[in-house]
Image (spheres, rainbow, N blue to C red):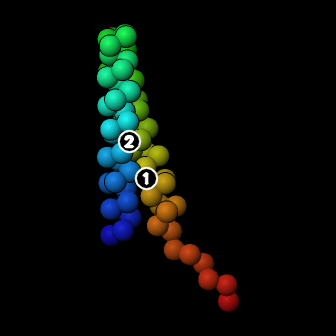
Amino acid sequence: MSLLIVYVGLVIMGDLIAYFVGLVIERTVPAASLPVFLAMYFLFLWVSWVIAVRITQPRVRPQ
């Protein structure tokens, strides 16, 4: 359950970053904003999963 909570939190943060970067690009080069936003959106989905798995990975105890 903690994996999903961490993942959703990271995805929301990544989506906000992608949104604001897309907004800045739209003001300068409107035609490039959608491809940049979509690329960042899907990149953040993957990166968020990798980070969430590493954060919630069980710790190994020395025996």
Q: Secondary structure at mark 1?
A: helix
Q: Residue at x 34, y 54 (%)?
A: 9
Q: Residue furthest right?
A: 63
Q: Residue at x 32, y 54 (%)?
A: 8
Is residue 42 in view from this perspective?
Answer: no
Q: Residues within 10 Å of mark 1 (few under 14, many from 20)?
A: some
Q: Residue at x 51, y 68 (%)?
A: 57
When asked about the image quadrant of residue 15, the answer is: top left
When asked about the image quadrant of residue 16, the answer is: top left
Q: Amino acid at mark 2?
A: Gly
- Decide: is 10 above or below 27: below
Q: Residues within 10 Å of mark 2 (few under 14, many from 20)?
A: some
Identify the disc placed on residue 15: none
The image position of residue 5, as x and y in percent, is 33, 62
Is residue 18 in view from this perspective?
Answer: yes
Q: Nearer the viewer, residue 54 or 26?
A: 26
Identify the disc placed on residue 14: 2
Q: Quadrant of the N terminus?
A: bottom left
Q: Nearer the viewer, residue 35 or 20?
A: 20
The image position of residue 63, as x and y in percent, is 68, 89
Q: Secondary structure at mark 2?
A: helix
Q: Residue furthest bottom?
A: 63
Q: Nearer the viewer, residue 29 or 42?
A: 29
The image position of residue 31, as x and y in percent, is 33, 11
- Decide: is 15 above or below 10: above
Say whether disc 2 or disc 1 marks the residue closer to the N-terminus.
2
Q: Which residue is mark 1?
A: 49
Looking at the rendered structure, the number of numbered marks drawn on it comes to: 2
- Decide: is 20 above or below 29: below
Q: Amino acid at mark 1?
A: Trp
The image position of residue 14, as x and y in percent, is 38, 42
